[in-house]
Image: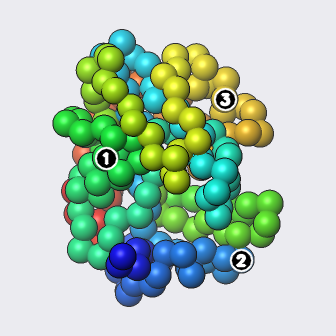
């Protein structure tokens, strides 16, 4: 099995190299590319997941539908499609760029730093789309109303990036109404 690589960034969000993902997340994690995705069905429900208890960083926290790291040379769309399939068994999505400029830093209880440029996308699916969670990645996956999602943002069992993203997503209205923010402010290292 190949070692998963992350894309390292400079202050201008330009790629400056790669590093093994597992060895790169520690107390001084370098700034790197990531993404978050919210799967929204035609009834307006959002797929919320709980990270696997075996995850090295932020195990067991509730968060958006899917997150991950684009590989070297991989576009955002391809990375999201790959991770949705790997983590949740979901395919055939329609993607929208929602928060292309999102970035954050967060420290886990064990001192591990997350330090990511993390564009946020919405993946639209039909109601009733089956979810086949990968237990190595996802402990639980549930369809929630937007009100439940907003409530989660105020609770400590949610991920820090989820809370920060919801601060920006809540003013945009219901998830199916989030506007397409385009791709102009995506990091230069991450094509759409």
Q: In the visual, does 44 lie left or right of 109?
A: left
Q: Residues within 10 Å of mark 3 (few under 14, many from 20)?
A: some
Question: Residues under labels 3 and 2: Cα distance?
Answer: 27 Å
Q: Position of residue 100 (x, y in %)?
A: 37, 51
Q: Quadrant of residue 121?
A: top left
Whether 115 is drawn above or below 45: the answer is below
Looking at the rendering, in which quadrant would you find the N terminus? Answer: bottom left
| Residue placed most toward the observer, 122 or 125 | 125
Residue occupied by mark 2: 27
Residue occupied by mark 3: 152
Q: Which mark is residue 119?
A: none
Q: Name which residue lies at 34% across and 27% down.
A: 130
N-term mark: 3 or 2: 2
Q: Residues within 10 Å of mark 1 (few under 14, many from 20)?
A: some
Badge 1 marks a residue whose secondary structure is helix
Residue occupied by mark 1: 85
N-term mark: 3 or 1: 1
Whether 42 is drawn above or below 190: the answer is above
């Amino acid at each position: 099995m190949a070692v998963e690589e992350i894309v390292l960034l400079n202050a201008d969000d330009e790629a400056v190299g790669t590093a093994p993902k597992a060895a790169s997340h520690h107390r001084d994690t370098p700034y790197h590319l990531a993404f978050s995705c919210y799967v929204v069905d035609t009834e307006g429900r959002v797929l919320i997941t709980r990270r696997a208890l075996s995850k090295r960083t932020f195990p067991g926290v509730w968060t958006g539908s899917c997150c991950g790291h684009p590989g070297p040379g991989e576009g955002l769309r391809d990375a999201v499609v790959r991770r949705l399939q790997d983590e949740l068994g979901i395919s055939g999505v329609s993607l929208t760029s929602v928060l292309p400029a999102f970035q954050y830093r967060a420290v886990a209880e064990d001192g591990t730093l997350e330090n990511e440029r993390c564009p946020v996308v919405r993946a639209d699916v039909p109601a009733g789309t089956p979810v086949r969670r990968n237990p190595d990645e996802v402990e639980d996956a549930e369809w929630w109303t937007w009100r439940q999602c907003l409530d989660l943002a105020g609770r400590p069992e949610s991920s820090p990036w989820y809370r920060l993203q919801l601060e920006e997503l809540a003013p945009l209205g219901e998830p199916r109404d989030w506007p397409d923010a385009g791709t102009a402010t995506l990091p230069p290292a991450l094509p759409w």
